[in-house]
Image: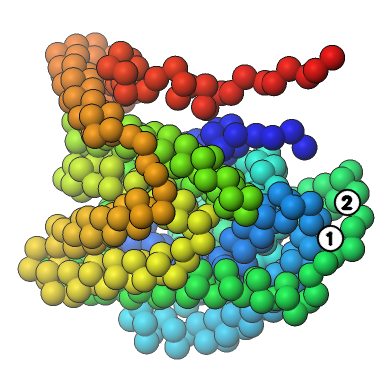
Amino acid sequence: MSAKSVAQSAMILTAAGLITRVLGFVYRIYLSNAIGAQGMGLYQLIMPVYSLAWSVSCAGFTTAISKLTAAQRAQGGYGNIWRIIRICVLISTVIAVSLSYVLYFFASEAALFFFKDERVILPLKVLALCFPAMAAGSCLRGFFYGMRESVVPAINQVLEQSVRMAVIFFIAQYFIPHGLTYACAACVIGIVAEEIFSFLFVFASFRKFKRINQHKQKPSLSYKNALKLILAICLPLAGNRISGSLLGALENTLMPQRLAIFSGSGADAMASFGKLSGMAMPLIFFPSAFLTSLSVSLLPVISEAHATNNTKRINRTVSKTILFTAVVGIGAAGLFTVFSNEMGSAVYKQDIGHYLRILGVMCPFLYIQMTISGILNGLGFQVFIFRNSLLSSIITILFVYFYVPVKGVDGFLLGWFVSLLITCALDLHKLKKNVEIAINFSDLIIKPLLASFLASLAARLLAVHFLFARFGQLPGLIIAIAVICALYVGLIVATGCVMPEDIRFIFPAKKQKRA
């Protein structure tokens, strides 16, 4: 297989991520109009259960496969790769089947005890059906990430979202008229169909890869030693993801309850929760499609470099990645702060501008934390990531419990911001102790801030005084976003924040073969 740069792999995943997110927005706009803010809140209420099941059954195993596959590939240990995959898929699927059984037969108790809402009983039972396919499919995707074969996961992303949308659009007319319970169940049926289809596609791709690339090699690792390697990576990561998912579930359960104290109405609280988590947050994370893909691509690449003691490659990769993360995050902050009201009304026809403005300011910290976690993961600091994630969740939950009843959603956003500042500072400190980051302060912060301010100001003036009046709100907003992006990129290049060597880092020239 020809070598690929981190960014080339990330670009494939980014293209798929952008397509998936565009499709996802069409899906969310349809849902928000069909079931309303309260329905979106109910749907978001059960999503931490989905996240928790993924964390328990496959999060650690998927990352372990990706990391160990990359390390073994660098050393030519293909026999060990097949053994590692077999162990991970077996354990992950057994755990997933157990979780399915527990959730299906105890959905009523979970709904009434944890969520205080019997409307989620049916959706929880439907959700339980997808766990085995989700676990096995996630493990196999980890193999493709570790092999730096991004095409299969990229195609899979798009197909997953397409299947979910097709199923929802087909069954919604039969379910939604029966109330929020059945509307939410229809959404979950889409998830189940998506996970089953995803597993079948990835499994077929895996079989094809093995047939074409016949690396027939006996494993040098015994089952016992392979299991030790897997658990050394898996247990800290699983602990991190499980605790994060449990605390996320607690946070999502507490939010409507504490918001009800602030607003005095359970329905209003659920609607506010739906606007924040189901509408505003997906918009904020849309520009992070590249960074999410980059974070996934970083893990095997840094693991390879770490396994071969290639310190120079690690330092260069980390430095360029952090620079691009800062550029994207600061640019997104300008975009969301100047067009917050227009985005909310144009996309969802809802007043979520206040949430978008606050979240927009948080974008650089959200994105940098996402990227650095991927880097630290590749360097083997799973326990450190676990500790930081735990600290972040505890801070946020304390604000939810004590401050949300006083300040409403703003109390949650303040707590999240405080936790981000603390964890970003700790992550950067840890990274600087282990990697030489070659970026100056001006390129990292000053130039992107200046470019974002000027581009945002120019686009805002153009939109208010010409575009909205000439083309209407939605077309004018789309043109304004294109203008702000073009101006921002132009200013970033003009100020020297991104240099030609950075472009070559993303699109390296192919090496000519010797005659």
**Left-right relation of 475 to 152:** left
* Location of residue 93 by image quarter: bottom right
Any mark on residue 36, and which?
none
Residue type at mark 1 is Gly
Q: Say which residue appears at 62% left-offset and 19% top-offset.
A: 509
Q: Is residue 340 above or below residue 124?
A: above
* Location of residue 59 by image quarter: bottom right
Q: Say which residue appears at 30% left-offset and 13% top-offset.
A: 494
In the depicted view, which residue is nearer to us: 89 or 84?
84
Q: Say which residue appears at 24% left-offset and 67% top-offset.
A: 396
**Left-right relation of 195 to 448:** right
**Quadrant position of the C terminus in the picture:** top right
Residue type at mark 2 is His
Any mark on residue 79, and which?
1
* Location of residue 470 by image quarter: top left
User: Is residue 130 in view?
Assistant: no
Q: Secondary structure at mark 1?
A: helix
Q: Position of residue 417 (x, y in %)?
A: 21, 56
**Quadrant position of the N terminus in the picture:** top right
**Left-right relation of 315 to 128:** left
Q: Say which residue appears at 20% left-offset and 74% top-offset.
A: 398
Identify the residue position indicated by label 2 in the image.
215
Q: Position of residue 296 (x, y in %)?
A: 54, 48
Q: Are marks 1 and 2 in contact (CB under 8 Å)?
A: yes
